[in-house]
Amino acid sequence: MTHSNIQHYTPLVARTLLVLLFIISGFGFITNFAGTVGYFTAMGIPLPALMLVLVIIVKFAGSLSIISGIHAREGAWALIGFTILATLIGHTGEGQMINALKNVSIIGGLLLVAVHGAGPISLKHKCPCPKCKAHRSMMAAGGACSCGTCEGCVKEKEVEIHIEG
């Protein structure tokens, strides 16, 4: 495999590996819903059943957005917020340092996605949301994008910073 192929495919593999934990644990929460509600109750989490549903939604929605590349940055920020909360709520006690540090490492990986986006292999060009449709229409018409968040804008900013710096 050539260097360019590695650079092309590695972000997809990395994104998938990064969110695998969220997907597997989300399925575990679904298959053991009552037990997880009991665990949330014992931890003192208010409205444990509702919170569990929200956690499952965030885990799956964030993971799918990161893997697909559709709004990967937003999905990464959602999972960062969730992971920070999970660390503060569940991994601050005695004997939890390794689990807390693992979460900090996961946050680091998610930050890379939040800052750099999905990479070359994604389905972001298929996104049906109005913002993305308007962006694609503007770009197809030869307009310059100024959203500040798409990869084209981010790369343009990087070139400006590099030239100025």
Image (cartoon, rainbow, N blue to C red):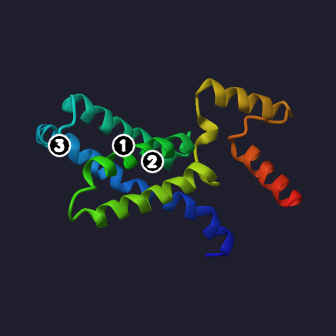
Q: Residues within 10 Å of mark 1 (few under 14, many from 20)?
A: many
Q: Which mark is residue 41?
A: none
Seen in the picture, residue 48 relative to 77 is either above or below; the reply is above
Q: Identity of the amino acid at label 1? A: Lys
Write down the residue under mark 1.
59
Instruction: Compare residues 47 and 56 and report the one nearer the observer.
Output: 47
Comes first in the chain, label 1 or label 3: 3
Residue 64 seen: yes
Q: Are marks 2 and 1 in contact (CB under 8 Å)?
A: no
Q: Is residue 68 left or right of residue 164?
A: left
Report the residue marked by disc 2: 80
The residue type indicated by label 2 comes to: Ile
Distance from disc 2 to disc 1, alpha carbons, whole Å, reads 10 Å
Residue identifier under label 3: 43
The residue type indicated by label 3 comes to: Met
Image location (x, y in percent) of residue 77: 50, 43
Helix, strand, or loop for circle 3? loop
Real-space CA distance between mark 2 and mark 3, rounded to the nearest whole angstrom? 21 Å
Image x and y of residue 78, in percent: 46, 41
